[in-house]
Image (cartoon, rainbow, N blue to C red):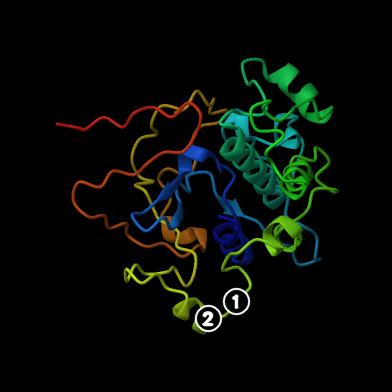
Amino acid sequence: MIFSCRYIHSNCVAHRDIKSENILLDRYFNVKLTDFGFCREAGRDKSGKTILSKTYCGSAAYVAPEVLQSTPYDPKQSDVWSLGVVLFVMVNNALPFDDSDLAKMVQRQLAKQWHFSTKVVDKLSPELKDLIRSMLEPDPQKRPDLQRILKHPWLRDTPHYLSIGSKDMANMAPKTGAPIAMAPKVINVNVNAKADPPTAGAKVIAMNTLAKTDPTNTAAKVITPTMPAKVVPKFMGPKAKEVKKRK
């Protein structure tokens, strides 16, 4: 997931709507980042200053406090916050903040008033807890960027494919013949369709202003999703709704 975000960030694009429902897994458990309806340019201007975003969008439960405060923000750093919420959900099976009252939610975000589930708090490693705390840092200036996150001990000291070369990755391929993604893939999921109702109880706080935009303008690598028959994407999240089969 971090690889996917680093890829689009390296192409000067921020997602701005990272949430569990927008992360899919294929049959080989490769991560697919989807729904680029809120993405925008995220680089530096001619003077070298960070291009700030002034559009306040996303799903409230995953949105960084600077976005909810309606102040110009670095969209890349807001993506990091959203990734932190996703990681929290993965290990707690619950959201860190209640989004039923956005004003109170911002206060809790700024005061760092969140906690790990009592069911897992003693099972999580200190390194994992530290990583989540750093990603849910309310001050975007103190929040680590993706390069720093990739160097965090929890990722650095965990068996993974983040720091090895392509040849090594090929040698580590499963014996079943399942392919290993050599680079993150970004899937375009029908951005020209009408916006679906918010899922998993998340509140969409802005309209999809890019719905009619050519997805190739995002500068992100876009591929057409192909799925085997009878395979349905699995949505991740504590309140994920069942995907109903359409007649």
- Label 1, on which residue? 164
Q: Is residue 1 visible?
A: yes
Question: What residue is at 46 percent from the left and 55 percent from the top?
Answer: 31
Question: What residue is at 70 percent from the left and 35 percent from the top?
Answer: 67
Q: Name the kind of residue labelled 1 in the image.
A: Ile
Q: Quadrant of residue 84?
A: top right
Q: Is residue 57 visible?
A: no
Question: What residue is at 75 percent from the left and 29 percent from the top?
Answer: 69
Classify 93 as above or below 79.
above
User: Quadrant of the image for the C terminus?
Assistant: top left
> Where does residue 236 sit, x and y in percent of width and height?
46, 38
Question: What residue is at 57 percent from the left and 49 percent from the top?
Answer: 15
Classify 41 as above or below 119.
below
- Label 2, on which residue? 168
> Where does residue 23 sit, x and y in percent of width and height?
47, 46
Residues packed near mark 1 inside 10 Å, few (<14), some (14 to 19) or many (20 plus): few
> Where does residue 32 sit, x and y in percent of width and height?
44, 54
Q: Could you tell me how far apart the alpha carbons at marks 2 and 1 are, in whole angstroms?
A: 6 Å
